[in-house]
Amino acid sequence: MTTIGVLALQGDVREHLRTLTGLAVEAVPVRRPAELDDVDALVLPGGESTTMANLAEAFGLLEPLRDRIAGGLPVLGTCAGMILLADRIIDGAAVPGGQRTLGGLDVTVRRNAFGRQVDSFEDDLDVAGVAGPVHAVFIRAPWVEQAGPDVEVLARVARGPAADRIVAVRQGHLLATSFHPEVSGDGRIHRLLLDLVSGA
Ligand code: GLN
């Protein structure tokens, strides 16, 4: 059986585990390097990207995560998870040396991009590879400000002041969304991750 891990240091871990379980895969929390070794794919959940990076370091996961990502592990990063996957961050946390990421995805993300007035909003998106609209919930979300040549844009905001902003991307085995696919009970974005495992 396919085993999908959810990085379980901080953030909305339980909702991802529940969504994955609904897709008939084994879904396991990952907190230690040994647990990371056993997964066929990984979800980096939403939460707070600086906290998650600090905890990953404290748990000895930063380098193992970077190694597995570089080795081709399929990963879905949602919201803070998108920030962790990004190679470059605009408006990252003001820490010496700049906010750390795991990297791998050739994008520049703007953190908290939708601004204070629009802390969170919802939209129905067309997502490449998914049939029918996807109801997307954005919570202090980043967007993709710039994407490298190998990055496929899967979705853009449909309406409002942020219309056309890039909010879902894929580069090879890495998927990222600005929104939270785990809150709506819709497993279709997670299904894209499973397709990467099976090579579909
Ligand atoms: N703003 C958060 C961060 O910078 C992300 C928010 C989220 O994951 N819902 O990490």
Image: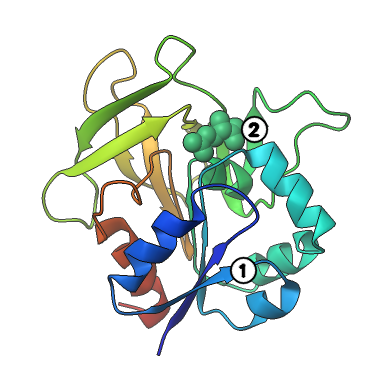
The number of numbered badges drawn on the structure is: 2
> What quarter of the picture does the N terminus occupy?
bottom left
In percent of width and height, residue 135 lies at 21, 40
| In the image, farthest residue toward the right | 96
Residue located at (33% from left, 62% from top): 19
For ligand 1, tell me if the residue under mark 1 lies within 8 Å: no
Residue drawn at x 50%, y 69% as measured from the top left: 74
Q: Which residue sits at x=68%, y=66%?
A: 31
What secondary structure is marked by label 1? strand
Q: Which mark is residue 89?
A: 2
List the single residue furthest toward the left: 132
Residue type indicated by callout 2 = Ile
Figure coloring: rainbow
Q: Are the residues flagged by discs 1 and 2 in contact, CB closer than 8 Å? A: no
Does the image show residue 112? yes
> Would residue 44 be found to the left or right of residue 151 on screen?
right
Most foreground residue, 122 or 176: 122
Identify the mark nearer the N-term, 1 or 2: 1
Measured from the top left, where is residue 13 in percent x and y?
Answer: 50, 56
Mark identifier at residue 30: 1
Question: For this view, does 18 lie left or right of residue 134?
Answer: right
Tell me how far mark 1 sits from mark 2, CA to CA. Answer: 25 Å
In x, y percent, where is residue 100? 75, 42
Quarter of the image for residue 68 reads: bottom right
The nearer-to-camera label among 1 and 2 is 1
- Location of residue 23 with respect to 81 vertically, above or below: below
Q: Dot 2 surroundings within 10 Å: few (below 14), some, or many (20 or more)?
A: many
Which image quarter: residue 34? Answer: bottom right
Using the image, determine if residue 96 lies above or below residue 28.
above
Local SS, label 2: strand
At x 68%, y 47%, the residue is 52
Q: Nearer the viewer, residue 56 or 67?
A: 56
